[in-house]
Image (spheres, rainbow, N blue to C red):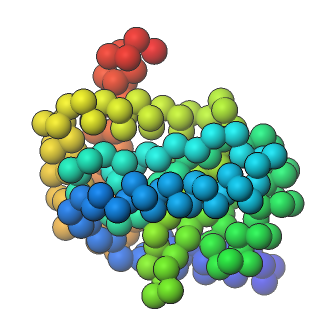
């Protein structure tokens, strides 16, 4: 029972953290590479590939200053027994969370800087996860700067309404992301 209360308190804290959007920073690419290198060197037998996705992966796009990594893993059991203890010991937050507000679940980590601000979100999934579709979205926005600007506007407008409600902020962007991902998959013939 105490564990449930502790977990709920942790979820409540994370969901209510203030959201901030900043202009694109070319250092995000290096931050991704540094974290990806750390993960692949630390867990080479579990991690198969790592992709930089989300707004920080799209040059010129304003974003929350949090680098998203999409990590293909061999098994969730190995993540739970080998990766979770190491990353939690390094002060990463760990959650077993649903992909789109419903199963299937995946392993999600939040890395923070010394001031407690989020720097990375690490999404560990199997190769058949629907989260891989986010790469179509990323690649399509890289090719379509006007669409990327439209997305940026949606994010900024959503931030004005939901700066302390991450769930509502994310849901406000969902229709655009879904529609654009479908378009992107058609464009890339997938």
Q: Where residue 127 sits in the image (x, y, percent)? A: 66, 32
Left or right: 31 as drawn, with respect to 105: left
Q: Where residue 37 sits in the image (x, y, percent)? A: 61, 55
Figure quadrant of residue 185: top left
Q: Where residue 42 sits in the image (x, y, percent)? A: 74, 59
Q: Quarter of the image for the N terminus: give it.
A: bottom right
Which of the two residues, 28 or 126, is positioned nearer the viewer here? Answer: 28
Up the image or down, 41 lies above or below 89; here it is above
* Residue drawn at point x = 31 percent, y = 30 percent: 140
Q: Where residue 187 sits in the image (x, y, percent)? A: 32, 16
* Residue drawn at point x = 77 percent, y = 70 percent: 86
Which residue reaches farthest bottom? Answer: 115
Q: Quarter of the image for the C terminus: give it.
A: top left
Figure quadrant of residue 180: top left
Count all numbered tags in the image, as a single digit. 0
Left or right: 122 as drawn, with respect to 137: right
Say whether residue 104 is visible.
no
* Residue drawn at point x = 33 percent, y = 51 percent: 55
Say whether residue 124 is visible.
yes
Which of the two residues, 177 or 68, is positioned nearer the viewer here? Answer: 68
Which residue reaches farthest top? Answer: 189
* Residue drawn at point x = 56 percent, y = 67 percent: 110
Which of the two residues, 159 or 190, is positioned nearer the viewer here? Answer: 190
């Amino acid at each position: 029972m105490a564990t449930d209360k502790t977990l709920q308190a942790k979820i409540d804290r994370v969901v209510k953290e203030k959201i901030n959007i900043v202009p694109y920073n070319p250092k995000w690419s290096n931050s991704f590479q540094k974290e990806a290198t750390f993960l692949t060197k630390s867990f080479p037998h579990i991690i198969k590939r790592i992709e930089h996705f989300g707004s920080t992966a799209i040059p010129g796009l304003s974003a929350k200053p949090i680098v998203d990594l999409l990590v293909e893993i061999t098994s969730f059991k190995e993540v739970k027994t080998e990766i979770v203890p190491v990353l939690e010991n390094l002060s990463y937050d760990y959650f077993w969370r649903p992909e789109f507000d419903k199963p299937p679940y995946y392993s999600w980590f939040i890395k923070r800087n010394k001031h407690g601000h989020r720097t990375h979100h690490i999404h560990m999934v199997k190769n058949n996860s629907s989260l891989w579709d986010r790469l179509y979205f990323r690649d399509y926005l890289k090719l379509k700067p006007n669409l990327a600007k439209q997305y940026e506007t949606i994010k900024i407008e959503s931030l004005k309404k939901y700066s302390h409600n991450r769930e509502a902020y994310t849901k406000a962007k969902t229709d655009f992301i879904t529609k654009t991902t479908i378009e992107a998959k058609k464009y890339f013939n997938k």
